Image (cartoon, helix red, strand yellow):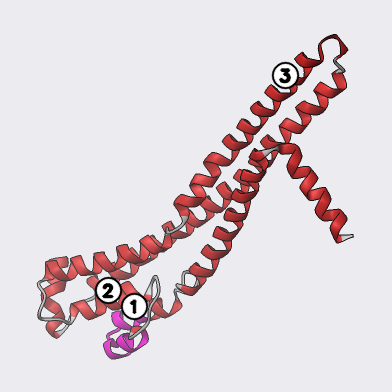
Amino acid sequence: MFQDRWDAIIGFMDMGGIAIWVIAALAAVTAGLIVWKILRLGASGTWRPRRAERAVRLWQSGQRAEARRLVDGRRGVYATPVRAAIEGMGRDDMTPEMTREEISRVAAGELFRQRKGLRALELVATIAPLVGLLGTVLGMVAAFQALEAAGSRADPSDLAGGIWEALLTTAAGMAVAIPASAALTWFESIADRAQGRIEDMVTRLLLTPATGGERRILEVAE
């Protein structure tokens, strides 16, 4: 039974020609990218901002040591910029401008990783329908060539069969492009939301009334 199903799949792929094989490869790439991206976002703590948010609240309430402990050694899209801001505000070997640049650099790096892989999804969403359309055009050309070669003995059903086989590639291309485009929009919204949270957390840290060695940085930031 497995062999029969496999033969049916191969037969379906052969009807679409080389274009359907290219689209199948794009579908595999899309599925792999989506799974990889979800796992990567989970590993970076994109859906778990609680620890970083708690560190910010502790810092605002004056519990500086506890706030540092929460993010000390932690890595993630939120914890890393928050830790950079907390550590930067307590350093005397950097100017305020250097400290703010360092915080921006760290945050930009995390946001870059949030958007990593999105260009590939965008490319798939763009070219999959085009590959499908190309396959349809080539299939139509082949169908009309066969019709011309048959001359007066041409059977309209043969032309209809060639046309629907050619249209398979357009349908396949759209079937790949639609989920790729939907996933791209979803991941972009996640990255935008992460950027907003990072900016909010870092700004709240910088605007917290400072004590001791942090005064110098906050006065310039304000």
Alpha carbon of mark 1 to alpha carbon of mark 2: how far?
6 Å
Secondary element at image label 1? helix
The numbered mark, 1 or 3, whose residue comes first in the sequence reads 1
Residue under the point 64% across and 39% down: 19
Looking at the picture, does residue 206 appear above or below residue 128? below
Alpha carbon of mark 3 to alpha carbon of mark 2: how far?
71 Å
List the residue tagged with mark 2: 205
Secondary element at image label 2? helix
Q: Quadrant of residue 68?
A: bottom left
- Mark 2 is on which residue type? Leu
* Quarter of the figure that contains the C terminus: bottom left
List the residue tagged with mark 1: 56
Residue 55 placement (x, y as % from top left)? 35, 81
In the image, the segment drawn in magenta is: 55-70
Of tags 1 and 3, the one toward the viewer is 3
Query: Was residue 57 drawn as part of the magenta stretch in this picture?
Result: yes
- Mark 3 is on which residue type? Gln
Q: Check disc 2: other Cα within 10 Å, few if <14, some if 14-19, many if 20+.
A: many
Q: Residue 166 versus residue 61: which sits nearer the camera?
A: 166
Looking at the picture, does residue 9 appear above or below residue 79? above
List the residue tagged with mark 3: 145
Residue under the point 58% across and 41% down: 128
Residue 110 placement (x, y as % from top left)? 36, 66
